[in-house]
Image (spheres, rainbow, N blue to C red):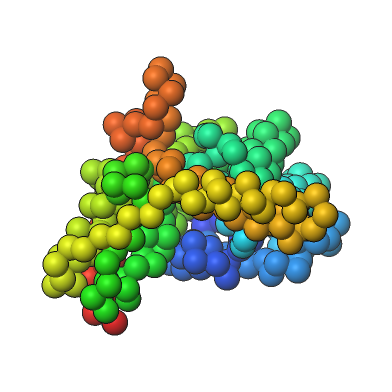
Amino acid sequence: MTKAHPSPRRVALAGASGTIGSAVLRRLQAEGHHVAALPRGALADADGLADGFRDDRIEVVISCIASRSGAPDDALAVDYGANARLLEAALAAGVEHFILLSAICVQKPRLAFQHAKLRFEAELAASGIGYTIIRPTAFFKSLSGQVKRVSAGKPFLIFGDGELTRCKPISDDDLARFMCQCIDNPGAMGKVLPVGGPGPAISLREQGELLCRLAGKEPRFRSVSPAMFTLAEKVLTLGAGVSGWFAEKAEYARIARYYATESMLVLDPDTGEYSAEHTPEFGSETLESHYRRLLAGV
């Protein structure tokens, strides 16, 4: 994607309080854009949003909102519903460009939140508004849950042999920079853009080896079988018909199994396999530098 050098724009940002959204907000402000950060509650009223967009003369809408749990009801309400109202308001107010933060995992949709995201992606693409859909790979935050565990001398948890999945994680700030470069960029208009961080693609075992080395620990691993999530889903599904609690927990088991077994890379259209080569790289921040910062604070 070619770089853009946009003039300051009037931007409405949904999801500014989230991890990625806050990075996008910082980047927009650093580039001199006028930013209206939309609270989550404002997304319930499309008419009110449209009035606000007109009053603020909004030219670009950026959505970084996503369901917190991935549960079916939450996914429908947020990944689809809140974004649909945001789009309705943008169309009514004559907004020129809608930039959507989606996810690489929608390539192989098996989960409720993935289907909700794809439903909105399709609606956005068919709406007639100028649009850009960004599908990042794994975030640094999602690969940081075992830092304290390893620092305490505990083994790094892997699924299977730790080589079932690979990803090219991207930092919050690099992703924010990529998203902001889409503003006023003809190369980004009407596109679905996958993006990863600096390569090479890394497996779960390699993440563990890296973290152990940086923490000054001998690499130790404990393997968990993804089959345990399959079993949990089957058991919980038995009660899904009589209780929403069981249905929700069954979905969590499906989510866990998905991330334990599916790579966060682009699917090669010719082979149907995940491809590090086909996954674009962007930015300069590495997982190693991120781990170093986290370990310094442990």
Residue at 30% over, 60% down:
222
**Residue 270: x percent and y percent?**
41, 17
Quadrant of the image containing the N terminus: top left
Lateral position of residue 292 relative to residue 71, left or right: left
View extreme (top): residue? 270
Residue at 57% over, 70% down:
17
**Residue 253: x percent and y percent?**
57, 53
View extreme (bottom): residue? 298
Quadrant of the image containing the C terminus: bottom left
- In this view of the protein, can residue 49 be seen by the observer? no
Residue at 37% over, 60% down:
143
Could you say which is closer to the camera, residue 293 or residue 181? 293
Q: How many marks?
A: 0
Residue at 61% over, 49% down:
233
In terms of image quadrants, where is residue 167? top left
Lateral position of residue 178 relative to residue 213, left or right: right
Q: Is residue 165 above or below residue 21?
A: above
- In this view of the protein, can residue 215 be seen by the observer? yes
Lateral position of residue 2 relative to residue 75, left or right: left
**Residue 45: x percent and y percent?**
83, 60
**Residue 10: x percent and y percent?**
61, 58
Could you say which is closer to the camera, residue 10 or residue 228? 228
